[in-house]
Image (tube, coloured by chain):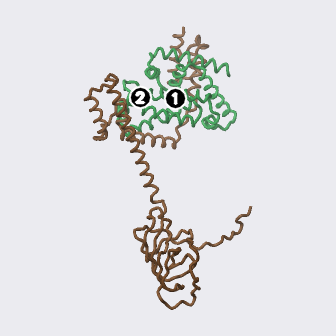
């Protein structure tokens, strides 16, 4: 009975596919109407289920992903472990692995059927290789990170601990432990020797070291004998007690000659106290 | 591009074949998956997963004459059914809102939503085999012969399954209605 009804239902579905109506089909089988009406209407409802189209953005993303996958598979066809890889293995890419496999085979390695010692040896070799390759990968990763971080790091990190420099130019400011010569700040400490009479406007010749933090530490300053400028500031009677102002000093200008040091940033502008603007800070 | 050429192209990781498989089956597969899930986001994820599975398994796929789409539909169907089971639902309310065509008469829209809702719920009550048959026949619009090939059954067996499935579905819908 079921088989007959299944055939009638199939016939009706075929007619409906061809354009007939459900009622038309039911009319053709009045005796089976009760048995096939609900199934036919259910089929019609299934056919009417909403089937939205794939959104364009999803389609593009999907296609892009598939193409990337294809490229990835083309690049690494040997990764396919089922032996159906369609692309030939790039020559030399599996050189070491093939060599090892050949060596093991020559020794009599036959997979799980090989002698136990040979299987153990192959496992040990695989472990050593994994460790070596892992360490190599780690080193490579570190090198990459260093390479990436290199340009972004401050010049101070690339400077040697103390690079000699010389600086010549007019003295613009004189403070107990910090002079500005030709626009460049120079730090003095207790070891710094000063020859001549330091006055603003006089030409000074500085020798010293550029430290890792870009500080220019003067070792010796020779001041040319010169008519003092009208605006010269009074010279401190003596350099006060040793102190190095922990200020990041800008890099010398072209007339400074630091040996083998990269160009550091420009001197910082003098700090001005911030005046809140209109509305700023208002709630 | 014939099915055999398409499969060969996919096995060779040919860009044109990869484009073709998305262009040819993207829409119908998406609609099919959506019919099962009723959820756009879930359908997109399942479609993507279907293609990934296809790529993973293409090397082991043997073209023996059955339409390639039958294989894809089977992957999609299994993934969709599992996803729906996992989500423990058959219909997403959001999906119905967006999927059912907007009609001027609100009563018609609501009726259409309820109908789709009830239909999916009734589908969930069928056996997996019955679900697969009716979905492939009436949503994927495959012929009885194609479904038989896809499910590795005889056409007669598919006809029987189809009848029993539609009979159960009709009864469930009548009871709910």
Q: Position of residue B169 (x, y in %)?
A: 60, 19
Tell me which numbered mark, 2 or 1, is placed earlier along the sequence: 2
Q: Nearer the viewer, mark 2 or mark 1?
A: 1
Residue B104 visible in the current orientation = yes
Residue in front for this viewpoint, A250 or A242: A242
Q: Chain of mark 2?
A: B
| Vertical relation: A27 (above or below) A242 | above
- For the residue carrying disc 1, how many other residues have a C-alpha within 10 Å: few (<14), some (14-19), or many (20+)? many
Which quadrant of the figure contains the C terminus of chain A? bottom right
Instruction: Name the colour assigned to chain A in the rendering.
Output: brown
Q: Which residue is identified by label 1?
A: B79
Instruction: Please report the residue visible at 36 percent of the width from the left and 39 percent of the height from the top.
Output: A76
Q: Which residue is identified by label 2?
A: B68
Dot 2: element: helix
Contact between marks 2 and 1 (CB within 8 A): the answer is no
Instruction: Name the colour assigned to chain B in the rendering.
Output: green
Which quadrant of the figure contains the N terminus of chain A? top right
Q: Position of residue A241 (x, y in %)?
A: 58, 75
């Amino acid at each position: 009975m079921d088989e007959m009804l299944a055939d009638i239902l199939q016939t009706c579905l075929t007619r409906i596919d061809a354009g007939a109506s459900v009622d038309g089909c039911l009319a053709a089988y009045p005796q089976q109407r009760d048995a096939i009406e609900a199934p036919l209407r259910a089929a019609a409802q299934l056919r009417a289920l909403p089937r939205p189209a794939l959104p364009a953005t999803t389609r593009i993303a999907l296609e892009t992903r598939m193409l990337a996958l294809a490229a990835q598979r083309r690049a690494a066809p040997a990764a396919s472990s089922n032996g159906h890889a369609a692309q030939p293995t790039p020559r030399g890419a599996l050189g070491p692995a093939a060599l090892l496999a050949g060596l093991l085979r020559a020794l009599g390695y036959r997979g799980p059927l090989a002698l136990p010692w040979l299987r153990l040896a192959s496992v040990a070799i695989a472990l050593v290789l994994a460790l070596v390759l892992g360490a190599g990968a780690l080193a490579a990763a570190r090198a990459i990170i260093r390479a990436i971080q290199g340009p972004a790091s401050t010049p101070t990190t690339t400077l040697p601990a103390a690079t000699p420099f010389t600086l010549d130019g007019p003295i613009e400011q004189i403070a107990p432990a910090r002079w500005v010569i030709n626009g460049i700040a120079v730090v003095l400490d207790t070891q710094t020797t000063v020859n001549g009479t330091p006055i603003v406007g006089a030409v000074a010749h500085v020798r010293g070291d550029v430290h890792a933090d870009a500080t220019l530490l003067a070792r010796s300053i020779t001041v040319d004998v010169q008519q003092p400028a009208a605006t010269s500031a009074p010279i401190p009677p003596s350099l006060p007690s040793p102190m190095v102002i922990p200020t990041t000093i800008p890099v010398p200008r072209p007339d400074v000659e630091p040996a083998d040091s990269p160009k550091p940033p420009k001197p910082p502008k003098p700090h001005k106290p911030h005046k809140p603007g209109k509305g700023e800070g208002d709630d | 591009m014939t099915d055999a050429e398409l499969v060969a192209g996919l096995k060779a990781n040919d860009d044109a074949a990869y484009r073709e498989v998305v262009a040819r089956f993207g829409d119908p597969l998406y609609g099919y998956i959506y019919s099962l899930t009723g959820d756009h986001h879930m359908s997109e994820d399942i479609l993507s997963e279907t293609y990934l599975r296809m790529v993973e398994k293409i090397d082991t796929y043997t073209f023996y004459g059955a339409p390639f789409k039958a294989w894809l539909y089977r992957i999609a169907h299994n993934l969709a059914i599992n996803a729906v089971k996992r989500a423990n639902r058959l219909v997403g309310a959001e999906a119905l809102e967006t999927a059912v065509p907007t009609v001027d008469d609100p009563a018609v829209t609501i009726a259409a939503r309820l109908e789709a809702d009830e239909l999916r719920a009734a589908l969930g009550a069928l056996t997996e085999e019955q679900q697969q048959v009716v979905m492939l026949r009436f949503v994927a619009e495959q012929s009885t012969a194609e479904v038989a090939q896809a499910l590795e059954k005889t056409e007669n067996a598919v006809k029987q399954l189809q009848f029993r499935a539609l009979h159960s579905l009709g009864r469930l819908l009548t009871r709910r209605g």
